[in-house]
């Protein structure tokens, strides 16, 4: 049997109840992303304070680098979680995989928030934090692939872009919630209290959503029906040359997206540690930037449904590349709140649009019988290699060169590579009168 006929046979004809992605199903699919990325992002925002609590050192730079290195350990287990939970989602269904991921992330969140400091329990403290990060990485590695597959499969063909755009949008929502928590805490707590336990409050605020999240995911409708799952178990999917090409291009684009996301997420620490602005301004910058990212992610999905996938990937990416250096030069020279908020907000608004179109494009380009595993593994490998190192590399290069423009150069390098890969991606949008494949 040809590969094309196999793919057509495995593609589902969804039940009528599944033809429209309900708000309940949408929230249930994305709440795991929101919690998991909230916790991941909150660690990044409070890297200085967490370093002081668990990694005391002779100077603040060494403490920060140890904290960021521990942040990076969470990326080591992402590929493992992607393979295990992604494959599980292709066999047993999207919902069981998403529920397993959410459960593990819940344990990790509570462990990280409640571990006593180094002064209290000594070396056991950083050991527990490292374990929590490894568990978080495993859970998050297995979250993105099944969730993206679920959103695409549950949506009608003419609204897949918007549906899948809630995947990157939920990440921005999580980052915004983390920045908002940081902003409120920095405004209402003394510096001493913020350093001592403010970051724990931020983590526990995310943990408050756990019961609601478990309930939502337990009643999600399944998009991989039992008969299809049985077929996929007896005839496991194999990657063709076309699939491997899509995964390779996806790896480069996701690496570019990852570097941009984590460098932008690093702006709170960058603003405090390098630009020496106040904590409220630093958290406010991240809050505004991430809010712009939410709007841009959803806009990218809508545009991808209207105009096709490729052009919505390519043209905003070109504009973002042209904006990057001038924005960071403005920030570095003025070191003003207006430059930080306005510059990064505008850059995030433009730079986020391409990735919603990419998410749905890659999900559509992969056959159903490997979609969960292939998307999750590609995503996790890109994140593990480039996300886990981005903030530590930027911190080290700034320390080495003394230049506040290091983030701009790193983002330019990554963005250019991403653009080249986008140019080679196929158009996957459905053939409709509104947009034809090019």
Image (tube, rainbow, N blue to C red):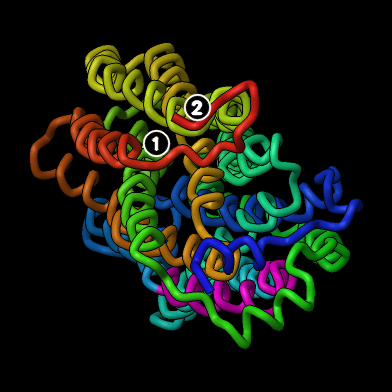
Q: Which mark is residue 289?
A: 2
The answer to which quarter of the image holds residue 315 is: top left
Circles 1 and 2: CB distance less than 8 Å?
A: yes
Residue labelled with disc 1: 264
Is residue 398 visible in the rendered image? The answer is: yes
Residue at 74 percent across and 46 percent down: it is: 155
The answer to which quarter of the image holds residue 394 is: top left
- Of residue 34 and residue 382, the one placed in the foreground of this image is 382
Q: Secondary structure at mark 1?
A: helix
Q: Which mark is residue 244?
A: none
Q: Is residue 394 left or right of residue 196?
A: left
Q: Secondary structure at mark 2?
A: helix
**Distance from label 1 to label 2 (Cα)?**
8 Å
Q: Which region shows up in magenta?
A: 77-99
Residue at 61 percent across and 78 percent down: it is: 88
x and y percentages locating residue 200 in the rendered image: 60, 57
The disc, 1 or 2, on the residue closer to the chain's N-terminal end is: 1
x and y percentages locating residue 336 in the rendered image: 36, 14
Location of residue 136 with respect to 410 vertically, above or below: below
């Amino acid at each position: 049997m040809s590969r094309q006929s196999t793919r057509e046979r495995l593609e589902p004809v969804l039940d009528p109840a599944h033809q429209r992605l309900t708000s309940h199903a949408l929230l249930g699919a994305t709440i795991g992303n929101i919690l998991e990325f909230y916790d991941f992002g909150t660690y990044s925002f409070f890297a200085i304070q967490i370093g002081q609590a668990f990694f005391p050192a002779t100077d603040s730079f060494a403490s920060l680098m140890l904290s960021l290195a521990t942040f990076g350990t969470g990326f080591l287990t992402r590929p493992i979680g992607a393979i295990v939970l992604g494959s599980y989602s292709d066999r047993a269904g999207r919902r069981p995989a998403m529920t397993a991921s959410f459960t593990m992330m819940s344990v990790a969140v509570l462990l990280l928030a409640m571990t006593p400091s180094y002064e209290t329990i000594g070396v056991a403290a950083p050991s527990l934090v490292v374990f929590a990060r490894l568990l978080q990485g495993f859970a998050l590695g297995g979250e993105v692939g099944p969730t993206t597959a679920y959103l695409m499969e549950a949506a009608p063909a003419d609204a897949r872009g918007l549906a899948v755009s809630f995947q990157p949008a939920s990440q921005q929502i999580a980052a915004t919630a983390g920045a908002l928590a940081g902003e409120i805490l920095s405004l209402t707590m003394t510096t001493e209290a913020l350093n001592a336990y403010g970051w724990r409050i931020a983590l526990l605020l995310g943990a408050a959503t756990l019961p609601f999240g478990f309930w939502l995911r337990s009643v999600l409708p399944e998009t991989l029906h039992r008969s299809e799952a049985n077929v996929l178990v007896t005839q496991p999917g194999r990657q063709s040359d076309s699939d491997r090409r899509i995964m390779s291009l996806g790896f480069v684009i996701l690496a570019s997206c990852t570097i941009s996301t984590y460098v932008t997420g690093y702006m709170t620490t960058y603003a405090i540690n390098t630009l020496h602005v106040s904590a409220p301004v630093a958290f406010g910058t991240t809050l505004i930037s991430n809010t712009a990212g939410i709007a841009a992610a959803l806009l990218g999905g809508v545009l991808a449904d209207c105009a096709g996938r490729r052009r919505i990937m390519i043209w905003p990416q070109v504009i973002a590349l042209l904006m990057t250096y001038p924005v960071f030069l403005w920030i570095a020279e003025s070191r003003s709140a207006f430059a930080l908020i306005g510059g990064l907000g505008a850059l995030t608004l433009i730079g986020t649009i391409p990735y919603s179109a990419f998410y749905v494009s890659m999900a559509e380009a992969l056959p159903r019988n490997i979609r969960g595993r292939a998307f999750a593994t590609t995503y996790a490998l890109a994140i593990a290699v480039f996300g886990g190192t981005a903030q530590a590399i930027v911190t080290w290069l700034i320390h080495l060169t003394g230049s506040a423009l290091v983030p701009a150069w790193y983002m330019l390098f990554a963005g250019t590579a991403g653009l080249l890969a986008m140019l080679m991606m196929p158009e996957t949008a459905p053939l409709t009168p509104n947009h034809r494949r090019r």
